[in-house]
Image: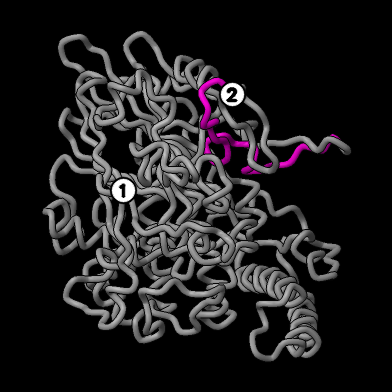
Amino acid sequence: MLISGTRYQQLILIIALAYTNLVFTGFTENSTNPYQETSNQNNSHTLSYLHTLMRYLSITKKSHQPDKADADLIGLTCDDAEALDNMAAVQDDSSILEEAELQEKAEHFLETTPYKSFPSLYEHIKKIRPNIAIPRGNYYIDRPIISAEEMRTLLRASICRATQTLSQAHWVGENPKQHPLFLKINYLPEYLAYQNYLAYVEKRVVEPGSTVIICGDLHGDILSLGSLTNMLIKDGYLDNNLKLKQNTYMVFLGDYVDRGYYGIECLYLLHRLKLANDAHVILLRGNHEDIDLTSRYGFKQELFDKYDVYQAQEIISDTHRSFDLMPVAFFLGCRNQQSGLTHYAICCHAGLEPRYSSKKLLTDPEPHAYELLNPSLLETRDSDSGVITKAFSSLGFLWCDFNTAPNTATHLTQNRGRSLSKEESAVLLQQYSTDLHKVFCVIGAHQHGILTKNPMMKLIYDIQHETPHHQGVAKLWLSPPDQLHNTNHLWNGAVVKFGVAPDTCFNTWHPNQDFDLKYFAYGNLTTGEEIGDWRLDVKYLRFPDDIIPSQLSLAGHQEELNPPLPAQL
């Protein structure tokens, strides 16, 4: 049932009045920055809902019915509204044409728009942040480096490519084509996208001797990501168009935004890398690729600081659409042609999911395959009401972690899921494996907290100077230590955790800590037919001297901010 013209006009009028009242009552409380106070952050949430309803009503005249839940968010009633759950299933000719035009525009953008190189991005950053070598305080820049139009076009191009790839991929078990909302390109209201989200994992069997570049939490550190890109171009892994050389892959472990200053610039470069290389660049979903967390930990505020309200909300919508299309885990495999045994390293943002088994995925003969997770893995039951809701915090791939001490039992940590023991991790790796498909290693990131207090952070950065073999990357439960401290070979049961990038809140927002991050660590993984042939070389970019493009100088600051690193670096 379509909404009547009179009713439509009434709704638009009420929205306009609500918006006007919001502007005059809420934003005047803090004229310098209307998004930094808690009360006005709530107003920005209200704006989000207003914008959602306006966007939805803008297409209602074509074929769709407004949802009462959307109306209730701002106190409206809509007696003749029906459920919106099947909105995207109604595909008229204009909708199909719109998506086809969108795909054409996306391809044209990729063909005609050169990417902004890191030196170019850096020059823009330096104008806003002249003393770039000194970590900033707790505030954001107020001028965009990437225009809203360019960012939206790039995000739409990435969404188009992802939906095409997933719709044509080989799926083990249920195919997401049965869920039209999941593969839809166009905008969806936030709550509708959340309720129709489908988590999935990806498997890729590569040739022995393949190179895999691995990067941990970025959290808006474009300086480290840009320097890594420059370094890979210099070393021949990438060409000047960001195209990877043969048998080379890149795996990013999630947490691209929040807690830093340049989340949108990181997403810009990550999506350019993804679009240039498609399946050879894996962008994993982290726990901060979540609309709830980005609303509370900085990314949403960053967008409102850099763009106007409408532009920011458009980018938020497209960004979270792209997050929904990222896998939550990636099984990287290499097959021994003689024995037929394939060894896998599982790459995920956080830890292992105890309720999942990868046996069907790994035994499928296709070397590149996907599998949807059971929706129940994203469900949580309220202890008081018993109501079941969908929550990312229930998924171990996004939230679980590991104990640093090998003899500590698995336990629950506050607001962060399970902390897995060495014993349970071994059981789960066995649960994921079969006789001819062995998952032997976990590679992840997901490190938060004050450097001198968090056990994993202390281990990663050798705060107590007891573990020199840990520098930016923690290798848990080494056994026997005398054989493995000085080797880069992986081993059966290995758990490797990458540290966070340096130009983030972890290095600037805790003034009482007595340790500073002075380098960015990333991995150069080489695959092999046997476990002992897999090699993980940890590489470093020193902060700030390796982070800053060599052709650009920071006169007067290099000596002051160049403390020596440990000798082994």
482 left or right, relative to 501 = left
6 left or right, relative to 316 = right
Instruction: Give residue 528's position: percent from left, percent from top.
Output: 20, 25
Classify mark 2: helix, strand or loop: loop
For badge 2, the amino acid type reads Thr
Classify mark 1: helix, strand or loop: strand
Q: On screen, 131 above or below 462?
A: below
For badge 1, the amino acid type reads Tyr
Q: Nearer the viewer, residue 340 or 167?
A: 340
Instruction: Give residue 71's position: percent from left, percent from top.
Output: 78, 66
Residue lying at 51% horizontally and 66% vertically, measured from the top left: 508
Distance from disc 1 to disc 2, alpha carbons, whole Å, reads 28 Å
Instruction: Give residue 515's position: percent from left, percent from top.
Output: 47, 57
Confirm whether residue 52 shows in the render. Answer: yes
Confirm whether residue 92 shows in the render. Answer: no
Of pointers 1 and 2, the one earlier in the residue sequence: 2
Residue lying at 70% horizontally and 69% vertically, measured from the top left: 45
Q: Nearer the viewer, residue 324 or 262?
A: 262
Residue lying at 45% horizontally and 57% vertically, measured from the top left: 256
Q: What label sits on residue 408 in the rendered view?
A: 2
Q: Nearer the viewer, mark 1 or mark 2?
A: 2
* Residue 156 colored in magenta in the image: no
Q: Identify residue for label 1.
A: 522
* Residue 400 colored in magenta in the image: yes
Report the span colored magenta: 386-407
Q: Quadrant of residue 238?
A: bottom left
